[in-house]
Image: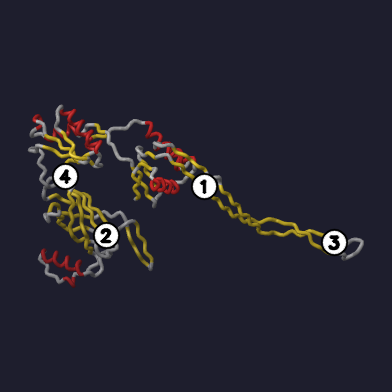
Amino acid sequence: MTFLRRVFILSLSFLTLPSFAMRLKDVVSVKGVRENQLVGYGLVVGLKGSGDSKSEYTGMSMSQMLRQMGVDVKSDLTFSKNVAAVVVTADLPPFARVGARVDIIVSSIGDAKSLEGGTLLLTPLRASDKKVYVVGQGPLSVGGFAGSGGGSSSSKNHPTIGRVPDGGLVEREVSQDFTNRSAVRLTLHNPDFTTSSRISRLINQELGGVYARSRDAATVDVMIPYDFEGSVVDLMARIERLPVQNDNSARIVINERTGTIVVGEAVRISTVAIAHGNLTLEIKSEEKTVEEPVLVAAEQGPVPNQPVLGKKTTTVNETTVKFNEEGDKLLTVPEGATLGDVVKGLNTLGVTPRDLISILQALKAQGALQAELEIL
């Protein structure tokens, strides 16, 4: 089964099924309820000679760390390949409380060859307000390795990036007070006027009044009803499970590097004719046995040594060139054709994914493709 035939069968199965509704919580997010990115600078120790070579900032960092511990050492005397300077990042989840644990990512910023077997020392992680929200420390888990010897080297994945599961300890909370809110703002993940209007109508039907209002394609404001004052959590638990039919614009996403094509079911095209021709050139070389007539001297006969006609067998290389051009096929697609019609028609032409990408780009340039073409 070819690629396009599989795409055609899959697309028809989508077209014959009804549109499934999604939960409201999967379509929108609540304003203020989000992750916060954190970053910090630290040191990884305990490496087996795979750390940074002699670098100024690594030595200075080690010197300052030891000085805080009561050991006064000059930076030029703290050279060690068992230490690597790293940048530590983490995402602080919403409603994270003091004492909660988060995962942290450790990335080398020097010329360390590998962080395998290392341990991250206590590192403060700050947000954009320069305040410390998480401190990180612990042994690294590296999903790769690197080694060398005898003039050869071997590596797998990225050994200069590691992870410390639950290595971050929350020290400061982000204020999230839902109790005294008088309104909640919902933000659509994929802005769309139709979906925004549907969400407002669903919430108003559920609450039995006009409490939700669509501000634009990406925003829906919900006023807190009197019955839910002081218990906004209960209100969100009630409306976040409402079924919503998400409506998206017609779009085709193409990744030319991998040949991936994703076509939405809302894609339509105008009346258009598509031509596709295949050209095949085959060159083949093979050995054949040929018998050639030659004159040879007859040892017996009426006239001794008289030349007579004989045969000689030889092997020669024969090269054949086969040129085949299939008749061009012209396909006419009617106006308003659906996804199934488009894929079925292109499948009859025997196009490959690469050919389909070119055809879609040509349709868009001609103005017959009624969809947004996004190329990754």
State the SS at label 1: loop
Of the residues shown, which amino acid type is indicated by label 4? Pro
Distance from disc 2 to disc 4, alpha carbons, whole Å, reads: 30 Å
Residue 283 makes an appearance in the image: yes
In primary-sequence order, the first of circles 4 and 1 is 4
Estimate the spatial distance between the alpha carbons at disc 4 and disc 3, rounded to whole Å: 104 Å
If you read the primary sequence from the N terminus, does the residue marked by circle 2 or circle 1 appear first?
2
- Give me the disc on residue 308: 3
Query: Dot 4 lies on which element?
Result: loop
71 vs 202, nearest the viewer: 202
Label 2 crowding class (10 Å Cα cut-off): few <14, some 14-19, many 20+? many
Considering only order in the chain, which callout, 3 or 4, is on the residue closer to the N terminus? 4
Instruction: Answer yes or no: is residue 10 visible.
Output: no
Label for residue 94? 4
Q: Which residue is mark 1?
A: 277
Residue assigned mark 2: 115
Indicate the secondary structure of the residue bearing disc 2: loop
Q: Which mark's residue is nearer the viewer, 3 or 1? A: 1
Label 4 vs label 1, nearer the camera: 1
Question: Residue 55 at x, y = what percent?
Answer: 22, 69
Type of amino acid under label 2: Leu
Q: Nearer the viewer, mark 3 or mark 2?
A: 3
For marks 2 and 4 on the same chain, the one whose residue lies earlier in the sequence:
4
Q: Are marks 2 and 1 in contact (CB under 8 Å)?
A: no
Q: Is residue 289 left or right of residue 266?
A: right
Mark 3 and mark 1: Cα distance apart in space: 57 Å
At x 26% / y 53%, what residue is drawn? 141
Q: Are marks 2 and 4 in contact (CB under 8 Å)?
A: no
How far is mark 2 from mark 1, CA to CA?
A: 55 Å
